[in-house]
Image (cartoon, helix red, strand yellow):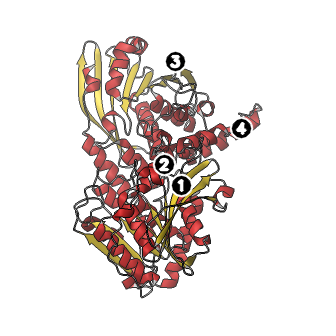
Amino acid sequence: MPILSQRLQPSKVVTFQLQQFLMQRVPKLQVPSSAEEWTAEAQRVRQHVLDDVIFHGWPRYWVNSPPRFEDEGTIPSGKGYQLHKLRYEIVPGFYTTALLYEPDPLRGRVPAVLDVMGHFPIQGNKIEFEQKFCINQALKGMIALNPEWLGMGELNAPGNAHWFAAHLDLVGMNGVGLFYLAMRRGLDYLSEDPNVDPHRIGVTGLSGGGWETITLSSLDPRVLVSIPVAGYTTLPGRLERLPGEPGDIEQNASDFLMGQGYSTLTAIRAPRPTLLIYNAEDNCCFRAPLVKPYVFDAIQPFFGLYGKEDVFQFHQNTNISAHNYGLDDREHAYRFFNTYFHLQGGAAEIPVGKYVKSYDALVVGLPKNNLTILGLAQKVASETARATVPSGAAAKAAWLTSERTKLRGVVRYHAVTMSHAWPEYNTYHNQVESVSYRFELSNGLSATGVWLKDVPTPSHAPMTIVLNDGGKKDAATQLWNRVPEVADRLEGGEQVLALDLLFTGDAAPDQPAEYFTEMLAATGERPLGLDAAQLLALAHWAQQRWNPSRLQVETTGIRSQVRALIAAALEPGLFSEIENDGGMQSLSYLLDKPVKYTVAPDLFCLDLYKDFDIDQLGALANPTRVIEIQGVQAPSTTP
């Protein structure tokens, strides 16, 4: 039906609305009046981010367990340094590897650097520039520990794609916790190494490793020197330069930017030596002139509180028009380490090309059944147990009240109202009339929809709200070709309101939805809560506008199914019926198939599957009747 295929809102408008919505949630960075005040506040922020965000849902005995490293022996190396292969456990059943470069001979306790890596899926920590960098650190008198990063090199397995952090969120463990533990274990190792001076430890890395660097070195006071390279910006910086800088899911972890941002993390470094390195013409992201106002200029006053302006430095690389930790950047790093580790060596890089080894020569090896990010999420899900619905009337009533309160918290539900329904188009022919709307909601976001009915049908007739994962354009096929019983509703005297909620159809931005869903979650919002709020607001508006004798919902697809169930659970009885076609029997489908985050990003809500499943949501929706027509099927075995 052409009327349902007509675009009612440009996708760029949706993008702008989301940018404005997110910009309102950017935390304000205020310079305190004294160093003492900021020291206390920095400690509070560290504790909050670690306890309430990063390690949300993680077993404390995993978080607090001592490092478990296995030395797989030395391999032939060059003159003046020694190279060890290490393997270590991140969490039970999940191992990674590392390479340890040491000065040879070792004389007393020496400084150490944790060299964290970015996105080098094939070569991982065996990439040439990283070998040269670590060898040079050893030759200049530092111990260098270079761990393999999740999803890279030896950990380059399908279940280790970073998007699977969202599956950890779903089962109740903030996905960023695994990334943080993986790098913190390296810091634990160095701190306990009898050859390391625990007061002279540094962290550095490129790209994703730059994110690791600022995150770990801000939140762990053991890090004296920090040199993040082309690794991060603030939320405004990301929003200003879409699609180039949305960031990875661990960089925009759930609640990570709620009340604090990367400018705050950078300020927490004060007064410890910190060198920010960015590239002027970076062909990936985070160009130096564009990020400097946010991550350096605004932070200088914090170091000034301690009289330590000189230890906070910014280097703009203009030698290479690319995303790099090239020679110029590395030599600036050597100089900075030498200065604050009190080493006497020069800053020039020592030629070590002849010592660079092949990937195969540096492979450490992992256990045969090593867990992956997805595998860990599936394991946690298999151990999840929820209380059944009580049978007694009083106990059931108390359970319903408690669980609805919990659900509001999980999806961060905040009711919205209709600011204005903009009628944009109408039709009146073939015995069917319609009006197309753009719905402006009170939180600044929007939706679109089309109201239809047969001309003779009274305005107070029963109404069906139609939601389709493909948007109302696909709902046109649903209405007129594939599911004739819906068309029969029009012919049988019912009204239809076909809606495009946020991230669907005309209410989708012109950038991938996952860019925004992860940033929304990072600022404390939950896309599912926004979806449910829109559906409820539009349902109430439809009741006032047409006064239907009965209001029901028909959904097609897993996203629409969960949106409708959550809305009905939050306002039981608003809908007489929810009919789901192509829905899930359980949220475990998201893990078992597995469904990629990019396919249904709004469904991966922190704690959702830990606390609820489809049947619980259906019970909370009572007295709304829930009907499943034909569900999706998960494979019998997990890939």
Decide if residue 195 is on the left or right side of residue 317: right
Q: Which mark is residue 154?
A: 2
Q: Residue furthest right?
A: 392
At mark 1, the secondary structure is strand
Q: CA distance from mark 4 to mark 3?
A: 27 Å
At mark 3, the secondary structure is loop
Is label 1 in contact with label 3 (beta carbons under 8 Å)?
no
At mark 4, the secondary structure is loop
Q: Nearer the viewer, residue 504 or 427?
A: 504
Asked if residue 96 is positioned above or below residue 276 in the image, the reply reads above
Q: Earlier in the sequence, mark 1 or mark 2?
A: 1
Q: CA distance from mark 4 to mark 2?
A: 40 Å
* Amino acid of disc 1: Thr
Q: Nearer the viewer, mark 1 or mark 3?
A: 1
Visible residue check, residue 146: yes
* Amino acid of disc 4: Ala
Query: Where is residue 625 drawn, in percent x and y?
Result: 58, 24
* Amino acid of disc 3: Ile
Q: CA distance from mark 2 to mark 3?
A: 44 Å
- Provide the residue designation for mark 4: 387
- Provide the residue designation for mark 1: 97
* Amino acid of disc 2: Glu
- Provide the residue designation for mark 3: 629
Query: Where is residue 256 drawn, in percent x and y?
Result: 48, 58
Q: CA distance from mark 4 to mark 1?
A: 40 Å
Q: Earlier in the sequence, mark 4 or mark 1?
A: 1
Query: Where is residue 67 drawn, in percent x and y?
Result: 63, 61
